[in-house]
Amino acid sequence: MDENIEISFGGRLHKFPIINGTEGEKAIDISSLRKKTGLITIDTGFKNTGSTKSSITFLNGEKGILRHRGYSIDDLTNKSTFLEVAYLLIYGELPNLSKLKTFKDNITLHTLVHEDVKGILDGFPSKAHPMGVLSSLVSSLTAFYPKSLDPNRSVEEINGTIIRIIAKLPTLAAWAFKNRMRQPLVYPNNNLDYCSNFLNMMFSLPTHDYKINKIVSNALEKLLILHIDHEQNCSASTVRIVGSSHASLYASISAGIAALWGPLHGGANQAVIEMLEEIKKDNCNVKKYIDKAKDKSDQFRLMGFGHRVYKNFDPRARIIKDAAEEVLNSLGINDPVLDIAKKIEKIALTDQYFIERGLYPNVDFYSGIIYRAIGIPTDMFTVMFALGRLPGWVAQWKEMRENNEPIGRPRQLYTGNISRKYVPINERKN
Ligand code: CMC
């Protein structure tokens, strides 16, 4: 039976349909609200506003559920490879062996970037943050592939752009790191799998080849899957809204990387390690930092805690916490910040402030500890998040284009001056 919601305004009753998602979620379709009533809705930060219908990722923040295309994040992380899950997100189904082989072969074929990219990279000071470098380099791909500027080209050509960005992002990311270290660039090695190739480009030097460690490449594979998509978050929404103006995929992904950079989004993984290091230096005084986080006159927040959608345990954080223990044990690393992190979690989970607000560790709380253990420097953490999130952004962009969504253009409630008379400069009082 069709359900409606009635809004009484201006002495009349107006009906708006309730639409249903496949997981029993309901939404009020207010697209005709302004036409019928002259009203708009306001919801700063989109805390309660759905921007689209999507069939890519389902999450239920109250129950701590995360599924991609219907498959649980636990199954995908434990049973699939990153490229398999990337295929699932982008094309809608898990690939069979032959489809996966073709997808992998295509990606492997395009890992090299144009030699002129090195000239652009050279222009960056060595202190440049790798996220800024990465975002710029991705945008620069439009210059090397001008046909990609038109997102209305054939399915085959769009697919070519999709393959290229997935193939080249690890190369660009590793080169952003090498540029910062002022070390010679390492070219992709197409005999290696996706994660091992990235690690090789990061850590090989002319003086010695990087020896691939399976524990490390498996840990990276797991982390990339855990970050692959998270429905309409800040960066995915950015990718969709930039793409909705018919900007190219490269331009949209470049914008997504910029959105991810901030410490309230992907940049939190870097901020967590910096926070844990600060606590370590401060005699591991965990209580002091818990109190600071609760103090409303203090700007300090417990980084890696809280989430816009999860008001229960972030399922990714659970998997990452176990993986962090496992990786550190396998590599024989004893990192004191892991103990500090566990101590913070233990205290916060029994503290009324955190309980009342539903603040739990999120995906970023333990991921930095693994990155550090596998040799990734702190300012590359958010780049790692971008590598993992890329297929999600691509899937969100593709879905938005295939659904022929209109340009994203929110309304506003104007609160500035009403119309006033222009005052010539010599007559102005202030
Ligand atoms: N430490 C202390 N208090 C917090 C924290 C925190 N990390 N997060 C939220 N709160 C409090 C906040 O002060 C507010 O309290 P009150 O109701 O008394 O004013 C209440 O909890 C609700 O917070 P909010 O800022 O209104 O919630 P939000 O949904 O707008 O923000 C968030 C979500 C993730 C930006 C926020 O929790 C935060 O800043 N966390 C730390 C940064 C972080 O870890 N970000 C990574 C998110 S997961 C990766 C990703 O997907 O991007």
Image (cartoon, rainbow, N blue to C red):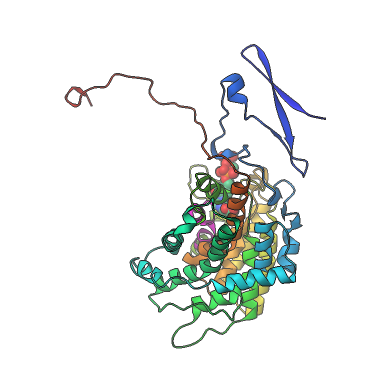
The quadrant of the image that shows the C terminus is: top left
Q: Nearer the viewer, residue 140 or 16?
A: 140
Q: Position of residue 221 (x, y in %)?
A: 64, 70
Q: Position of residue 408 (x, y in %)?
A: 53, 40
Q: Can you name the residue that lies furthest to the bottom here? A: 207
Residue plotted at (62% across, 26% down): 32
Figure check: 369 above or below 356: below
> Left of 337 or right of it: where is 4?
right
Q: Quadrant of the N terminus?
A: top right
Residue 280 can be seen, yes or no: no
**Residue 114, how many percent across, how many down?**
43, 70
As rendered, which of 226 and 298 lies closer to the eye?
Answer: 226
Identify the magenta region: 253-274
The prevailing secondary structure element of the residues shown in magenta is: helix
Q: Nearer the viewer, residue 146 or 39?
A: 146
Q: Is residue 294 above or below residue 116?
A: above
Identity of the residue furthest to the top in this view:
11
Residue at x 62%, y 37% (from the top left corner): 49
- Within the image, what quadrant is residue 303 found in? bottom right
Q: Position of residue 305 (x, y in %)?
A: 60, 53
Is residue 409 among the parts visible in the rendering?
A: yes
Figure label count: 0
Residue 144 occupies quadrant = bottom left
382 versus 46 height, above or below: below
The residue lying furthest to the front in this view is 154
Give left or right: position of 132 versus 390.
left
Camera-side residue: 405 or 82?
A: 405
